[in-house]
Image (cartoon, rainbow, N blue to C red):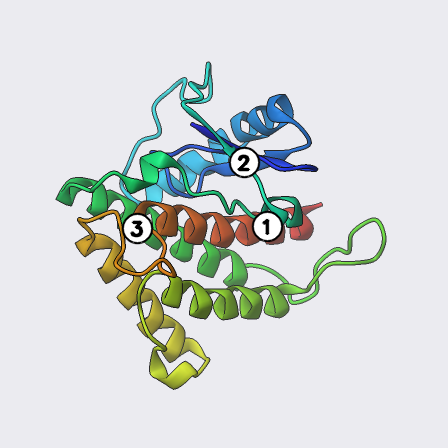
């Protein structure tokens, strides 16, 4: 478990479970929110063919505290942990790729099963379904470059371009072995998997919450 400490937000990230990452106003609230989301993340792990251990949300072992940044306070986990610079075994790389693929699968299901107009926030804000899906798609184009890929499909959008982009991201993650990229502009694969899966799930769960209440 790593904690990323910003000025206004703290992110708690399960380093061995890409995508299981929640924030709070302080360390205890971030860990509490992470525990609250264990059942929801267990469903993602199941799609990946993995079992989140019973009791995984009890007694978190914080192995690293990272300094936060404006990215943290903006609302995204932007800290790269020392553990992210550990090389990957073939099994670890495959597992990370499986969890990212599972996040995409769940997002696609949620989008397909949700109404186009979502419940607004307390101040009348919040994107609707298609705007959220388009935002995730646009972010993944940037994430693909950070994962070490160039523009895929000429920077085009749409279902075919999204599918091609995801396939190549998954291939890069599955084939990752060396944790330290050759360029400082490229994310270590462990962090890339965590950041991509977190962003996809954060919006999948947002859609679920705003359609069901």
Q: Marks 1 and 3, Cα distance to the nearest angstrom?
A: 19 Å
- Check disc 2 and report its element: helix, strand or loop: strand
Q: Marks 2 and 3, Cα distance to the nearest angstrom?
A: 20 Å
Task: Identify the residue at horizontal 61%, vertical 54% (top origin).
Answer: 207
Question: Which residue is more in the foreground, 27 or 132?
Answer: 27
Left or right, 67 with reference to 126: left
Task: Identify the residue at horizontal 17%, vertical 49% (top origin).
Answer: 177
- Crowd around label 3: few <14 · some 14–19 · many ≥20 (10 Å): many
Q: In the current view of this chain or complex, which residue is farthest to the left?
A: 90
Mark nearer the viewer, 2 or 3: 2
Residue receiving disc 3? 189
Question: Which image quadrant is residue 63 in?
Answer: top left
Q: Marks 2 and 1, Cα distance to the nearest angstrom?
A: 11 Å
Against 145, is 32 above or below? above
Q: Earlier in the sequence, mark 1 or mark 3?
A: 1
Residue 165: % across, % down: 34, 70
Q: Earlier in the sequence, mark 2 or mark 3?
A: 2
Against 57, is 75 above or below? below
Residue 155: % across, % down: 42, 82
Question: Which residue is more in the foreground, 14 or 99?
Answer: 14
Mark nearer the viewer, 2 or 1: 2
- Check disc 1 and report its element: helix, strand or loop: helix
- Check disc 3 and report its element: helix, strand or loop: helix
Task: Identify the residue at horizontal 54%, vertical 36% (top origin).
Answer: 67
Left or right, 111 with reference to 62: right
Residue 187: % across, % down: 36, 54
Residue 12: % across, % down: 52, 32
Label of residue 10 in the image: none
Residue receiving disc 2? 67
Residue receiving disc 1? 71
- Crowd around label 1: few <14 · some 14–19 · many ≥20 (10 Å): few
CB of mark 1 within 8 Å of CB of mark 3?
Answer: no
């Amino acid at each position: 478990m790593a904690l990323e400490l910003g000025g206004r937000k703290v992110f708690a990230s399960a380093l061995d479970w890409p995508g299981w990452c929640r924030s709070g106003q302080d360390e205890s609230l971030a860990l509490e929110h992470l525990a609250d989301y264990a059942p929801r993340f267990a469903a993602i792990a199941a799609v990946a063919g993995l079992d989140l251990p019973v009791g995984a949300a009890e007694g978190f072992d914080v192995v690293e505290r990272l300094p936060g940044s404006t990215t943290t306070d903006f609302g995204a986990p932007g800290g790269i942990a020392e553990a992210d610079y550990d090389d990957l075994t073939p099994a670890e790389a495959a597992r990370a790729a499986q969890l990212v693929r599972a996040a995409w699968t769940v997002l696609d299901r949620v989008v397909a099963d949700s109404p186009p107009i979502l419940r607004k926030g307390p101040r009348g804000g919040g994107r609707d379904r298609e705007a959220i899906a388009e935002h995730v798609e646009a972010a993944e184009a940037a994430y693909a470059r950070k994962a070490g890929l160039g523009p895929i499909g000429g920077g085009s959008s749409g279902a075919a371009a999204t599918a091609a982009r995801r396939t190549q991201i998954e291939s890069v993650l599955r084939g990752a072995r060396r944790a330290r990229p050759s360029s400082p502009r490229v994310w270590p694969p462990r962090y890339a998997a965590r950041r991509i899966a977190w962003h996809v799930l954060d919006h999948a769960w947002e859609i679920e919450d705003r359609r069901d209440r």
